[in-house]
């Protein structure tokens, strides 16, 4: 049976019937009513959920993939935190094991977002205190352990530009984040092959009219950047500003183990962080989020972002950023990864490769 409703086709939201098996087969326009049918969300920065942290290994990665799938995220990059090399290698192997043998009810694992350890000691935020200067030999070992798609690094560190070039030559996306860089230092990284900015505005110098820093560079000439739209990390006005300036702005959760859980204390790598209400804290610093991408969509629409645009920045643009041609759109031949939402943008159904999956988590 086809899905009937308002389908986000490449031309925009259109009423009709969507025919699919594992892949999209056809869209039949028709004067029908029904729910919103959107491409499945893609989260390129997510540490955990339902009490589990990607640093714990394979079973934790599977748990977070189940949790976020139930909220419409059909593909994701499990994300590490700064840690000793042995911890990171163990986590990377766990992510790879989950990726290599996917199970029903788990979001697609697209690879890894390596956030750290090549970060500024002065801008760690809630990252555990194990930063290192860029090391090509260590990075090569990380790449051997798992398919890393994105690396967050501080471009002002000694050897950072060499690392950017090393990664770019291998098809990995180097992103600037957790950085004290000046505008000039960030520009050198952009020219060397850095592709984006990790949780833009956060864990970097604030925008100043005489010292624009990485934020000024992103707003002036950045093609890609990620933002956390939870209403805590970034004011909605600054989200709207970034939307005007960065063509490839896409949205991430930066969710940690506390997502989907009651208030309490949870792991973030070797840190213990506290969920209080809608925020997660390490002392007075935000420590990731409890966001899911369905809530991100609702937030963005409430802040005045048109539904079509918000949905594409949660699906189509992340897919394009990673160079994935068969995800992120509802068009013939694309994978049938879909999220069905009611008029209040609450998740009704999720489909992964054409198969309906459970949506009872969280």
Image (cartoon, helix red, strand yellow):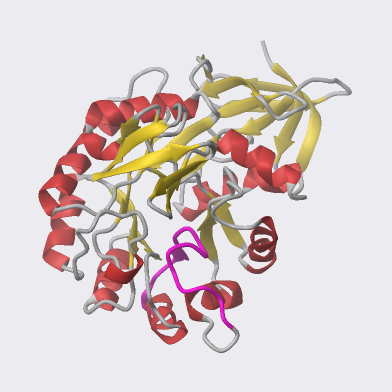
Residue 112 to residue 260: above or below? below
The quadrant in which residue 110 appears is top left
> x and y percent of residue 319 in the render?
51, 47
Which of the pair 202/104 is nearer the observer? 202
Question: Residue at point 64% right, 58% down?
Answer: 235
> x and y percent of residue 148 in the render?
29, 50
Extreme residue toward the bottom, this view: 210
Residue 144 to residue 19: above or below? below
Which of the pair 113/143 is nearer the observer? 113
The quarter of the picture where the N terminus appears is top right
> x and y percent of residue 296 in the render?
60, 41
Is residue 122 in view from this perspective? Answer: yes
Which of the pair 295/324 is nearer the observer? 295
Q: Is residue 262 left or right of residue 273?
A: right
> x and y percent of residue 32 in the render?
85, 20
335 within the magenta span? no
Residue 49 to residue 271: above or below? above
Q: Main secondary structure of the magenta part?
A: loop
How many marks are shown on the rendered structure? 0
Question: Residue at point 71% right, 36% down?
Answer: 8
Instruction: Give the residues drawn in magenta, as a range.
Output: 192-208
Is residue 96 in view from this perspective? Answer: no
Question: Residue at point 54% right, 54% down?
Answer: 233
């Amino acid at each position: 049976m086809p899905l009937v409703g308002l389908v986000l086709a490449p031309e925009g939201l259109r009423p009709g019937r969507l025919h699919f098996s594992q892949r999209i087969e056809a869209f039949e326009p028709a004067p029908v009513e029904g729910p919103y049918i959107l491409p499945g969300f893609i989260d390129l920065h997510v540490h955990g959920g339902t009490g589990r942290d990607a640093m714990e290994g394979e079973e934790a990665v599977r748990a977070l993939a189940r949790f976020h799938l139930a909220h419409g995220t059909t593909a994701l990059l499990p994300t590490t935190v700064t840690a000793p090399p042995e911890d990171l290698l163990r986590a990377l192997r766990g992510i790879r094991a989950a990726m290599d043998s996917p199970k029903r009810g788990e979001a697609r694992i697209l690879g890894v977002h390596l956030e750290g350890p090549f970060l500024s000691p002065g801008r760690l935020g809630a990252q555990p205190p194990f930063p290192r200067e860029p090391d090509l030999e260590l990075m090569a070992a990380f790449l051997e352990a798992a398919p890393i798609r994105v690396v967050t690094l501080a471009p002002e560190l000694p050897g950072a530009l060499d690392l950017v070039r090393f990664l770019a030559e291998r098809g990995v996306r180097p992103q600037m984040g957790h950085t004290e860089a000046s505008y000039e230092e960030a520009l050198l990284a952009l020219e060397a092959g850095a592709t984006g900015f990790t949780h833009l505005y956060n864990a970097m110098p604030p925008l100043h009219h005489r010292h624009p820093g990485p934020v000024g560079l992103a707003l002036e000439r950045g093609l890609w950047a990620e933002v956390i739209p939870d209403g805590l990390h970034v004011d909605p006005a600054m989200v709207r500003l970034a939307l005007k300036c960065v063509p490839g702005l896409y949205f991430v959760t930066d969710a940690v183990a506390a997502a989907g859980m009651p208030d309490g204390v949870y792991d973030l790598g070797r840190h213990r962080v506290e969920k209080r209400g809608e925020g997660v804290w390490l002392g007075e610093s935000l420590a990731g989020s409890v966001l899911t991408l369905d809530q991100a969509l609702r937030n963005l629409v409430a802040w005045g972002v048109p539904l079509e645009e918000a949905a594409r920045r949660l699906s189509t643009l992340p897919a394009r950023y990673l160079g994935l041609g068969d995800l992120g759109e509802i068009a013939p031949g694309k994978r049938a990864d879909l999220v069905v939402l009611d008029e209040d943008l609450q998740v009704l159904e999720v489909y992964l490769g054409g198969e309906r999956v459970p949506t009872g988590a969280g």
